[in-house]
Amino acid sequence: MGSIGLWLIGGRGSVATTATTGLLAMQARVVQPTGCVSALPQFACAGLADWDSIAVGGHDIAEVPLRKRAELLAEAGVIPHRVLDAVGDGLADVESELRPGYHPATHAGSQAGAARRLAEDLRAFRQRRGLDEVVVINVASTEAAFPRLPGHETLEALEEAIAEPGRTVLPPSSVAAYAAFQAGCSFVDFTPSLGARVPALYELAVRRGLPYAGADGKTGETLLRSTLAPMFTTRALTVRSWAGTNLLGGGDGQTLADAERASSKLSSKERGLVALLGGEVTAPLHIDNVPHLGEQKIAWDHMSFEGFLGARMSLQFTWTGYDSALAAPLVLDLARFTAAASAAGQRGPLPSLAFFFKDPVGSDEHRLAEQFQLLVEWAGDL
Amino acid sequence: MGSIGLWLIGGRGSVATTATTGLLAMQARVVQPTGCVSALPQFACAGLADWDSIAVGGHDIAEVPLRKRAELLAEAGVIPHRVLDAVGDGLADVESELRPGYHPATHAGSQAGAARRLAEDLRAFRQRRGLDEVVVINVASTEAAFPRLPGHETLEALEEAIAEPGRTVLPPSSVAAYAAFQAGCSFVDFTPSLGARVPALYELAVRRGLPYAGADGKTGETLLRSTLAPMFTTRALTVRSWAGTNLLGGGDGQTLADAERASSKLSSKERGLVALLGGEVTAPLHIDNVPHLGEQKIAWDHMSFEGFLGARMSLQFTWTGYDSALAAPLVLDLARFTAAASAAGQRGPLPSLAFFFKDPVGSDEHRLAEQFQLLVEWAGDL
Amino acid sequence: MGSIGLWLIGGRGSVATTATTGLLAMQARVVQPTGCVSALPQFACAGLADWDSIAVGGHDIAEVPLRKRAELLAEAGVIPHRVLDAVGDGLADVESELRPGYHPATHAGSQAGAARRLAEDLRAFRQRRGLDEVVVINVASTEAAFPRLPGHETLEALEEAIAEPGRTVLPPSSVAAYAAFQAGCSFVDFTPSLGARVPALYELAVRRGLPYAGADGKTGETLLRSTLAPMFTTRALTVRSWAGTNLLGGGDGQTLADAERASSKLSSKERGLVALLGGEVTAPLHIDNVPHLGEQKIAWDHMSFEGFLGARMSLQFTWTGYDSALAAPLVLDLARFTAAASAAGQRGPLPSLAFFFKDPVGSDEHRLAEQFQLLVEWAGDL
Amino acid sequence: MGSIGLWLIGGRGSVATTATTGLLAMQARVVQPTGCVSALPQFACAGLADWDSIAVGGHDIAEVPLRKRAELLAEAGVIPHRVLDAVGDGLADVESELRPGYHPATHAGSQAGAARRLAEDLRAFRQRRGLDEVVVINVASTEAAFPRLPGHETLEALEEAIAEPGRTVLPPSSVAAYAAFQAGCSFVDFTPSLGARVPALYELAVRRGLPYAGADGKTGETLLRSTLAPMFTTRALTVRSWAGTNLLGGGDGQTLADAERASSKLSSKERGLVALLGGEVTAPLHIDNVPHLGEQKIAWDHMSFEGFLGARMSLQFTWTGYDSALAAPLVLDLARFTAAASAAGQRGPLPSLAFFFKDPVGSDEHRLAEQFQLLVEWAGDL
């Protein structure tokens, strides 16, 4: 396919900066696409956009220059210094495509007005860069859980509600999804925020013939859980407890130390575990903010399980990763896959992208190996 | 299907004793089939033999009473005391079906003569118990690697060679496989020993219309490796090192502390890892004998891997299990599946049972989830 | 010294049952004093009471027979079956020395009245058994934090307050301490409950010439923390975070799943860490109830620290223990040491016993090695 | 005291480069002395040399520029880029003090001749820099174990033997120690190589009135072992097994992958463990070369221990550190302490420095806390 645009909500954040820098580095031929699922041989014939034909832009409420963020990530060990040196011009070019994001606290008019502005930015980006498809991906900070309101039920109700000045009907992630669909762009929720998961937005996506995917990128503990849980179930071993502790530094650690925001993360994790194990399990789960870890993320999980004749056994793992380095390539993958789905005329939720998410829209499949097979088959049919 | 026999080579060992006691406990309705794959709903329609219609016998060179072994396993925490109380009569019944095993050091005549005696025991067991199928499963101590000899190449060459008195052409595991086939029984290698993996024995099995499976039951570290390695490959993460340390007590620890015997175990583990990761990886692997652990087995694996932009990340796990409790239910599963394959007329290696093995005969598939799907599909076709 | 009595508050609980069974087993010569600090050669000349001259009794609000509790602990793997067989008569004898405990919910009159009854039980025990010293040790469930009341400040105020019928001035642990002192017994808090740590009780103990010790037996995570923290400080390595997760089954897990009760535990743990590291450290700490673990207790701690040139490094440990098996020998040690202190005329808090406690009364020393040296020197002077 | 010199055998290696860079960074006031034991308040009054009055030089058989090595360590994450920028001039200055090392493979004459050359370098360094004391510290690659020869027994025999051209009587580490003593310098073995531990060299050191210390810096697994083992013994818990696996990248990994060189490391580790636990323990120990780890070093230790009533419990830890960042500050500490000892007229082995070593000369004390107390007391008396 032709040129595509990747528009990042939270375009100056760690994940966005890493994804942007990495894409530029691949375009500059200084790194390999390690960690990019879409670069596997299984997808060679899926007609995905070339790395070279992807342009990046985005919204962000922060104003720190992209270059500065990239330097901080280099100090934190996520971006090699030699890569930074190679992508200077590219970063300046993307910087020119970043626009002020939307946040209710700093916005005066109606949410409809905000969405119009966002959509206008998207249309201008597409036109300026001559893009065939634009995929909007939300990688902003996780929002606190947002209540379900009557205005969410139908598109008509929604548009009426958001037209009222000063009223907050949708969280920022959903305003972004609304704007994306209005501008003819597909949408991906990489966070557990509400995003497109609102009946009215489903209606809008389908009406406009646009696909969307989400939610909550699976990059660490849950990736392992969706890998290990099927081992227990196919071996008929009964998992009796699955305890988890996550230590996070960086902005993510700070965000999730806020109990309200953490709750949406925790509940998306728990849904998956119950679905995977198919029954009751004691599953205490903690997310702790540990600033000294910087961009590192550490997950310790302890599983106790019962085997033959009631034998008590256990497994524990410790995962040490860089959150941004794990998330960024998946963001690029999702841009390529979603753009291809859109080009192929798919609309509404994309359950075949469940492989990427903790809480996949339109899918009950949480087993990683099965998710991968679904993805391969689906991509083969594109 | 009707009644089947499970004949255990090493019938007085820990795995055999646990499998036997557990089967009797299921027949006595005092335990559930936790850890038995064949009891999963996916296999409900595969027409496998009922637990109640399985009879157990075996060969062993040791003479310690089965009851005594079961008591030791109860003290070691593998068999609950209440289970032991419930299966007293059953153990005595199985004890009556145990016969002296074959070992070159204590046998005077030819290996052909030894095999005739073993085969006779098998035929008598089948007749006495009125069994439709008998599956011979090797759960004896791992043997040292055995050299490939000219006599292994064809059945004719083999039979000529083993007819010579005093000559050791085959290791005990292969003599057992030969005897099994001669007696019309299918054969399963649950250890890394040579067993049926000899061209002449393949010829014999096919000629007699008998199936066989193996090798080396996948119960701990390798089970996890075949689960986790596909996570890395489908996520395009490059595993650069995979180090493993195994601490074993019990008889197994003692056997594998012997470098020669360990070597067959270690090489079957390594073949799998390379096949799973599809490339070079630094993979130091150790098996240590730690008597204090008793029946417990502890595996620590440390993986270092490379992600996006070369990010260095790691995973480590510690698995704490009871080897016998992990192996025993799989032995019962293999009896049921292999008997069903035999009844369905399948012959030669059974690649569909790869799910159970570190080094599956007739199969290059090492990914656990894919192995499970193969098993389910195959069982559905039986 | 002569005969001593060990009177356990919570005499039917897991720790008490294990301590009692173990003492009886040592008296029956069927086990060694593994885990008993007072049996080390360093204390051979301290004149501690022989194991044979210790009698056990206690208070408990539960009524389940001691024998029954011991059987449950045998099933849970804490007490070997052969030990249980050897101590039958002894358990019956201790059973005859157990009396109903005090709990405000089931008590009608004043707390002074309750204390009189408890003290009477203690005096009768001493007389009946002909004991030179009686040490009361609290091993009952951890209580919720209790507010500081004006009545706690002086003995006079306290006695006035507790004389009022229906008024709850003290938590049960402190009523037990009050009763102990009134009966001329020394007192040890093995839990984080308030116990003797009330100014009025200090006054009483000193007036009566009695020693006391506590609080909160150091049996797992904190034992390791007080061992490892000095390694970091003496090596000039800066610990930046020390995260901990505790998984507990059994009654203790249930008790501490209650946030109010856990809070007293958590704060006693935290005080120690800050004292050990001498500065700011991010230290999230969790206690989770995982019933499947039974009597097992698992602690995972992750420390991140900074070394030369700011190098980021880490240590993590997993401790897997049986809480009762860890606590019980220390309870016996404390009985011997405290009785000896009392016989030697020591009164008030015993800082030299800090080695045993998370939150030692009368001491700021949290480093394990230094605590041990203090103990050895003190015992040498007795 | 006045100015001192630190002369590093292996002056271009990772440890030496990190120590040198770190010292220069402290002199440039851009880093704190984190990880430097001698900077603790406990040693403020010991009269140690100021950081500013330490000059560095050394011998090395490699020729790679110091600056280049520092850059590689910056890429590997051991030296921050900002530090490298601050010490450019200093590195050039130290580079001017590096001289070709001695190696039997490239040396033609007698070992006496080689030693004369080395000693001459030392004398010239002292004079050129106007130093009061010079401490030679061996941080070169670990040597293979060297046999005990008759020429080692007395100084006279040694000098006769090394005078013969072409004869290899001493390993390079011992030639360095001999040269150091001849030049009036004290000597420290930071590796497990033979170094000064030869009777003839003891004789020489004492005759010249010079102190020496070693051997084998305690920076990771052994540091933890000497911390944790006393916890078990003072708690009367019986350690039954202590298994260890070390994963090393970098040059150290390569060196120790060589079984002969590893053997001297492994035996110095084992001596310590037996001394600490005071009895039999199953202690398998592995050192694996894992190049992908780079400068990182990972140690996993698993201890199984027996508690009250024979309860089986376990502890495991994983230590993740940068070897050079752990070793370098200790090298600086040793320079300061040894120079002070020399200035104070101490001669022969310095047992009070046991705190720093796996296999301390002149000391049987392996418990870390006790070693620290000895150090503090000794330094107070200087």
Image (cartoon, coloured by chain):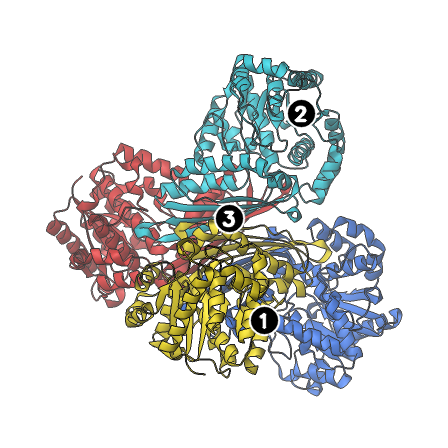
Chain colours: A cyan, B red, C yellow, D blue
Q: Quadrant of the C terminus of chain D?
A: bottom right
Between marks 2 and 1, how big is the CA–CA gap?
A: 58 Å
- What x and y, as percent, mark residue A376? 47, 29
Q: Which residue is mark 1?
A: C351
Between marks 2 and 3, how big is the CA–CA gap?
A: 36 Å
Residue nearest the observer in this picture, C221 or D100: C221
The numbered dot on residue C259 is 3
Q: Quadrant of the N terminus of chain D?
A: bottom right
Tell me the crowding category of disc 2: few under 14, some 14 to 19, or many 20 or more residues within 10 angstroms, Cα based.
some
The numbered dot on residue A104 is 2
Between marks 1 and 3, how big is the CA–CA gap?
A: 29 Å
- What x and y, as percent, mark residue B124? 13, 53
Q: Could you tell whether B156 is left or right of D207 in the image?
A: left
Q: Do the dots labelled 2 and 1 sit on one chain?
A: no
Residue nearest the observer in this picture, D322 or A275: A275
SS under mark 2: helix
**Amino acid type, callout 3:** Ala
**Amino acid type, callout 1:** Pro
Q: Could you tell whether C91 is left or right of B66 in the image?
A: right
SS under mark 3: helix
**Amino acid type, callout 2:** Pro
Residue C277 sits in which quadrant? bottom right
Q: Chain of mark 1?
A: C
Instruction: Tell us which disc is closer to us: 2 or 1.
Output: 1
SS under mark 1: helix
